[in-house]
Amino acid sequence: MAKKKKKRPGKESGKINKNALTNSILGIFGNEPQKTYNYKQIAAQLMVRDAYTKKLINEMLIELKNEGRIEELYRGKYKLKSKAGYISGTVQLTSSQNAFVVSPDLNEDIFISHNHLNHALHGDTVKVYLYARRKKRHLEGEVVEVIHRSKATFVGLVEISKNFAFLIPDSRNMPYDLFIPLEHLKGAKNGQKAIAKITDWPKKAKNPFGEIVDVLGFPGENETEMHAILAEFELPYKFPDEVNKAAEKIPDEITPEEIAKRRDFRQVPTFTIDPHDAQDFDDALSIQKLKNGNWEIGIHIADVSHYVHPGTIINEEAEYRATSVYLVDRVVPMLPEKLSNGVCSLRPKEEKLCFSAVFEMNEQAEIMDEWFGRTVIYSDRRFAYEEAQEVIEKRKGDMKNELLILHQMAQILRAERFRNGSIAFERDEVKFNLDEKGKPVGVFFKEMKESNQLIEEFMLLANKRVAAFIGDEEKNKKPPTFVYRIHDLPNMEKLESFAYIIHKFGHRILLTSGKKIQESLNKLLEDVRNKPEQHLVETLALRSMAKAEYSTDNIGHYGLAFKYYTHFTSPIRRYPDMMVHRLLAHYLEGGKSKSEGKYEELCRHSSEMEKLATDVERASIKYKQVEFMQDKIGQFFEGIISGVTEWGFFVEIIDNKCEGLVAMRELLDDYYIFDEENYTIHGRHTGKTYQLGDKVRVEILRANLAKKQLDFAVVDEETEDIE
C-alpha cells in the first residue's frame, strides 16, 4: 500500500492568506517602530513553527523591503520605514490637552498625545516624527522641534504669593500658567491684568517661566479690557516713541513748489462724507460742469505716500500693522495721529495733497474720459452721513446741487453693478451707545442709506478703474506687477450646505452657474430683508463665500462682479492702498515692472493682518454684548437659533443681535441627540426638535465677561407665566 503523502502546512484548500500575513507582519513592526526583526523573530511573534510559513515570511520581508515599506539595516535585519519620516505642520490643541498637527503634506491630521507635545502650544509650527500607522488607528507622531511659536506673549491675571507669582492666561488655548519670579513682575499687582512673555521652559518643568512686559490694569475697566483684547491677538495698542517722534517732524505746510507739480482742484466744489465721529478723512469728492455739458467728477484720496516713504521707520510700522483696527469704542490707527488725523486727513477748509481719479461723465453716468495723478484740493464742507442724507431726502441744504447730481449718478452705477451680478451684502452694523466709562447702555443698528451708497459707488468706481488702467490686458499686453483685491468663486460644497439650510425655512438659491448663484442670492437677500431670519441668512450666506484678499495675481472679484478691482481709496487705514499709490505713480512716470515676489509677500501679510483685525473687532463687539446683558440675568427675549452643535445650540436675540449658548444640560425635558446632517437637536422621547432658524424664547442665565460668553435657557410661555 502506497505511503500517504504528508500535507504541507498551507498547501491544503484553505491557503495562507498573504494579505492577512502582510498586515500581521507590518503590525509587529508598527507596534515597535524603532525595533529591528529578522524572519525568525517575526515567526516567533506570530507563533509560526512550520518551515514552509517561515520561508514565506522571509520572502515577504524581502518583498516589503523592495516595496519600500521596511528597510534592511544589515543582512536579514529589518525595521519599519516611516512613510513620511519628518514633516512639519501646525498644532491644534484639544480640550483634553492632546493635539492634532495639520500638515499641508498629508491628507489627514497627525495625533500627538499630551506626553509627546514637548512644550508645543496651540498654533505653533512644529517638526513631527511620524510613527508607523498602527492597525485601525490615527496617524500618530511626536513633536521633535518647535519651529515657530504662534504667540510670543500672553494676556492674563496676575496671582502673587509670598515667593513667586503666576500669570493665569485668559485664552482657553493656553493650558499652562506662566511662572513669574517676583523680580520680573514689572510693578504688576495681585489681581491685575498683564501681558507676559515666555523666557524659558526647562525640559522637565511643567510650567514655562516668564516675565511681565506690560501691566494693563484691573479687570472690568474699559481701557484694561480693550487693551487686553488687542494684546490677546498680539496687536499693538500704542506707537513706539521713535515712530511718534518721526511723525512729529513731518511739516504741516505745503510748499508752492509741491503745488506747482500737481493738478490744482482748490477752486472746484469739494466735500467729504464720513461717520459723525470720524477723525481721519481718506476721501473727498469734487464736481464741476464742463463746457460740453458733461460732468467732471474727482475722487480725491489722501496722498499718504507723499509723506511716508519706503525704508523709513513710519513705513516699517505701517507695513507691519497693515491696517487700522476698529474696536467698539476706538480706532487703533495704522499711522501715527499726526498723519492719520492731521497732515493726511482731508479736513474741511484746509489745503491737502491727494492722489486722484478724475472722470468725465455724462448724465447717464457713462465714463467719457479718465485721468489719474497727484492733485491739491480744498474741502469746502465736511458732511456726516446723516447730514448728507437729509440733503438728499429734503432736496435742500448745503451743496444741494452737487450732492443730488452725484446721488443720481451713484444710483445709476449701483443699478448697473447689480445687473452685472454684484451681490448685495449690506448688513446692518451692530453699534453701542456707551457712557463716559465705556459701559454699553444701548444697542442700535447702523443702516446703509443713499448717502452711504453715494460714497460707496464712487469709491468702487475709482478702485475698479485704477485696477483696469494697470491690469487690462488689451491695453497692456503684459501688465506690470500690481496689487489687486480679489474674490474667488464660492465653494460649491458650502453653497449646497447653505441651500439645504435655507430650504428648511422656505427659501432657495439656484446653483446651476456663477451668474445664477449671484442672481438668486440677491433675490434671497431681498426676500429676507426685515424678516426674523434676515441676520442668520446673511451670516450663513457670507460664510459660504470665499474670503476676499490681496494678490498680485488678478482673478477678478466675484462678489462685486468686477474683472479688475483694487484698493486705492483708503491709504490712511490700509497698507495695500499705499502700495497701489506707489505702484501707480511709478508706472505713470514710465517705470518698469516691480518685483512680483516682494509684493505678493506684502499682499499675503496684509490679508493675514486684515483677518486678525476682523477677529479683534468681533471680540470687542462680543465683549460689549456680554457686558450689555450683565444686568439682564433672568429676563426673557425672543431669538433665532443661529447655530447647532453637539453640545447645544446658539440663539441670537432678535432685538439686539446678542448671541448665547443653550447648552444640552439646560434641556431638562428630554434626552436630546445632535443630528449633524440636518442641523437639528431632537428629543429621544418627546420628538421635540430645535432646528437652525427656529424662533425660540430664552432666559438669560449667565454672562461671563472673562470668556465673552452668554448662557441661555429655553423657556415656553407656560413656564414664564408660572414664574
Image (spheres, rainbow, N blue to C red):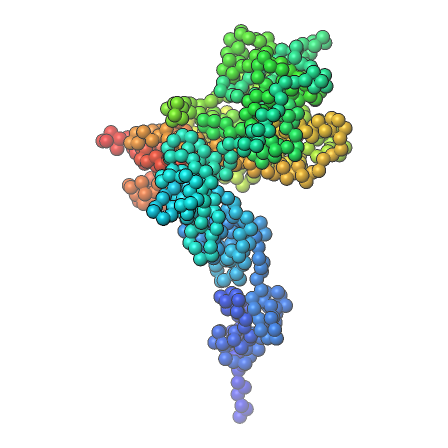
* Foreground residue among 14 and 97: 97
Q: Is residue 250 left or right of residue 7?
A: right
Q: Could you tell me which residue is drawn at 44 percent across and 49 percent down? A: 209
Q: Could you tell me which residue is drawn at 44 percent across and 25 percent down? A: 431
Q: Is residue 538 above or below residue 645?
A: above
Q: Quadrant of the C terminus?
A: top left
Q: Position of residue 561 (x, y in %)?
A: 62, 29
> Residue lying furthest top in this view?
396
Q: Is residue 274 left or right of residue 160?
A: right
Q: Could you tell me which residue is drawn at 56 percent across and 38 percent down? A: 608
Q: Could you tell me which residue is drawn at 54 percent across and 68 percent down? A: 22
* Foreground residue among 607 and 413: 607
Is residue 215 visible from the viewing direction of this image? yes
> Residue lying furthest front in this view?
183
Q: Position of residue 71 (x, y in %)?
A: 60, 68
Q: Is residue 715 above or below residue 109?
A: above
* Foreground residue among 639 and 68: 68
Q: Position of residue 551 (x, y in %)?
A: 64, 36
Quadrant in the picture for residue 520: top right
Q: Position of residue 529 (x, y in %)?
A: 47, 24
